């Protein structure tokens, strides 16, 4: 039975998380002696996912899918799963997929495990390790349902290259209008989106006021990073809510997370503990964040950040 992947794209470009999903699905498919089918709902013209391991790409041709709508995507994927006989569906941990996957699970009467952190421990039935309690513990779940939906955590498996020539075909789905109408879509204006960023530069109340964010934006620009902030900073209106990171904000799974003037409250750490390397800059040597940090600088952000920008600019100029 094939493995179906929901291949999310953004303005015609497949996200790194989608490439990772396909690679993950391919590794599973090789174990299960089956094939990977990628379902593409938006901008299907760029649908070459063979290099990440997909055997087939289905372009779901329906104009109702041109803007993400969880109900309609779940309906479409449910039809594809039935048509292809897929018994495993892989989705990402994006906000859209987290919204859509439970709807799909209901439609397919499938079991759904989010936050999966690696290939299955067993394949028949599927047993997977997944993060629970805001990543504080790992649970092992065995899916007894006929169809399994796995939500892969970002950066849990990595992107792998294959030399597969994926067969790309249109696939019709019949959709009726959704009970949810999307009237407008406000996209965050950040140059690099937090969810996709390899590097995130994040700042907290230690920055004293919104007028001091120039150096944070500059550091982010030099590093090609996304900017983020702690909850009080967005509550105070210093930064947009789209930048708020933590338990009640966005999760971050970047390779590098730089926290500047953030104390490291448990609710903030809950959102960033999937990030690989954490660097903390704080005047208080007893700030809790240092306990979670890989590298720490005890010092004043207003001295360190400009120095860091200068050194990075010099380094880039020398290595241009
Ligand atoms: C239910 C609930 C949910 C929550 N959810 C979230 C969430 O999702 N995300 C989140 O972030 N918070 C969340 N919080 C709030 C959280 O508990 C903290 O209050 C918050 O994270 C603190 O933000 P902060 O670190 O920016 O500010 P502060 O706690 O005020 O820390 C500022 C830090 O800056 C340092 N500092 C000061 N001056 C400088 C300087 N010049 N240079 C360098 N460092 C300096 C200080 O030493 C201090 O460590 C939640 C709280 C609750 C109760």
Image: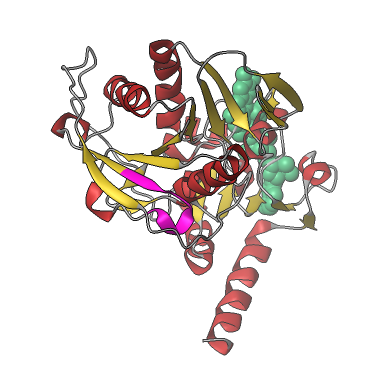
Horizontal and vertical percent position of residue 292? 79, 43
User: Residue at image x 47%, y 64%?
Assistant: 221
Position of residue 38 relative to residue 223, above or below, is above
Between 307 and 266, the one nearer to me in the picture: 266
Horizontal and vertical percent position of residue 75? 30, 20
Does the rendering let one see residue 210?
A: no
Q: In the picture provided, is 97 more to the left or to the right than 268?
A: left
User: Residue at image x 65%, y 33%?
Assistant: 268
Q: Is residue 255 magenta?
A: no
Residue 188, located in which quarter of the rendered image?
Answer: top left
User: Residue at image x 54%, y 64%?
Assistant: 219
Colour approach in the figure? secondary structure
Residue 298, located in which quarter of the rendered image?
Answer: bottom right
Q: In the picture provided, is 62 more to the left or to the right than 152?
A: left
Q: Is residue 51 magenta?
A: yes
Residue placed farthest to the front in the image?
Answer: 33
Horizontal and vertical percent position of residue 249? 53, 30
Q: Which residues are magenta?
A: 49-57
Quarter of the displayed picture in which ligand 1 can be seen: top right
Does the rendering let one see residue 97?
A: yes
Position of residue 299 relative to residue 180, above or below, is below
Between 68 and 87, the one nearer to me in the picture: 87
Between 197 and 33, the one nearer to me in the picture: 33
User: Residue at image x 53%, y 57%?
Assistant: 216
């Amino acid at each position: 039975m094939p493995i179906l992947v929901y291949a999310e794209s953004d303005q015609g470009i497949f996200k790194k998380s989608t490439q990772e999903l396909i690679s993950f699905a391919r590794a599973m498919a090789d174990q299960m002696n089956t094939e990977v089918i990628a379902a593409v709902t938006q901008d299907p013209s760029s649908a070459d996912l063979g290099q990440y391991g997909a055997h087939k790409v289905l372009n779901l041709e329906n104009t109702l899918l041109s803007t993400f709508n969880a109900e309609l995507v779940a309906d479409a994927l449910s039809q594809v799963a039935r048509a292809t006989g897929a018994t495993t569906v892989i989705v990402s941990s994006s906000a859209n997929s987290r919204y859509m996957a439970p709807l799909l699970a209901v439609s397919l009467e499938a079991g759904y495990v989010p936050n999966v952190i690696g290939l299955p421990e067993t394949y028949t039935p599927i047993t997977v390790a997944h993060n629970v309690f805001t990543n504080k513990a790992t649970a092992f779940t065995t899916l007894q349902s006929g169809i399994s939906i796995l939500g892969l955590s970002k950066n849990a498996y990595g992107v792998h290259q294959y030399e597969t020539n994926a067969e790309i075909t249109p696939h019709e789905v019949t959709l009726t209008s959704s009970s949810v109408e999307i009237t407008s879509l406000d996209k965050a204006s950040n140059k690099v989106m937090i969810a996709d960023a390899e590097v995130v530069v994040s700042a907290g109340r230690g920055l004293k006021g919104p007028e001091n964010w120039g150096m944070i934006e500059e550091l982010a620009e030099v590093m090609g990073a996304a900017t983020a902030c702690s909850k009080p900073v967005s509550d105070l209106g210093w930064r947009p809510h789209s930048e708020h990171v933590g338990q009640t904000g966005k999760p971050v799974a970047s390779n590098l997370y730089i926290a500047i003037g953030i104390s490291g409250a448990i609710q903030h750490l809950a959102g960033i503990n999937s990030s690989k390397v954490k660097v903390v800059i704080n005047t208080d040597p007893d700030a809790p964040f240092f306990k979670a940090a890989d590298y720490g600088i005890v010092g004043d952000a207003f001295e360190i950040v400009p120095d860091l920008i200068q050194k990075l600019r010099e380094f880039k100029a020398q290595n241009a």
